[in-house]
Image (cartoon, grey):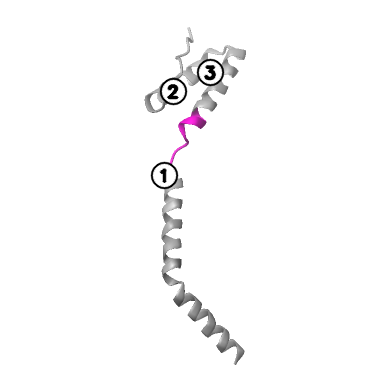
Amino acid sequence: MENRETFLIWKLILQKNNLRNIFFIILTIIVVIFFLTYDKSCGIDHMYILNEIKIYEKSLNPEFCEEVLEKIIFYNDSCTPVIEILDCG
């Protein structure tokens, strides 16, 4: 008897909140899709590249400079502020 009453209570709760539940499910799916398709922000890339420039200035490794230079060029094409191009010569 008690199980039947509990079942009826949950059935009523789910029917009453059905639209709200559907809304939250759709919103959750949209948020998940957004985060899966969204790349890192330009601000994070900017800080990462500045850190790599500091590492390069300590090591002066020309191969590492070329890697950092490629990242800077890619960053400057898609983000602002523009980072000054390194002289790897």
Nearest to the observer: residue 35 or residue 70 = 35
Q: Which mark is residue 81?
A: 2
Which quarter of the rendered picture does the N terminus lie within?
bottom right
> What are the residue bounds of the magenta stretch?
37-45
Q: Which mark is residue 37?
A: 1
Question: Looking at the image, do the residues carrying marks 1 and 3 touch, with CB atoms under 8 Å apart?
Answer: no
Which comes before the other along the chain, label 1 or label 3? Answer: 1
Which comes before the other along the chain, label 2 or label 3? Answer: 3
Instruction: From the image, tell me which residue sits under label 3.
Output: 64
The residue lying at 52 percent from left, 85 percent from top is 8
Residue 39 against residue 1 in the figure, above or below: above
What kind of element bears circle 1?
helix
**Other residues around mark 1 within 10 Å, as few (<14) / some (14–19) / many (≥20):** few
Q: CA distance from mark 1 to mark 3?
A: 29 Å
What kind of element bears circle 3?
helix
Task: Give the residue type at disc 1.
Answer: Thr
What kind of element bears circle 2?
loop
Residue 74 against residue 62 in the figure, above or below: below
Q: Is residue 44 magenta?
A: yes
Left or right? Give the position of 6 relative to 88: right
Nearest to the observer: residue 14 or residue 70 = 14
Name the front one of labels 1 and 2: 2
- Residue 9 in the image: state x and y as whole percent: 53, 82
Residue 74 against residue 37 in the figure, above or below: above
Task: Give the residue type at disc 2.
Answer: Pro
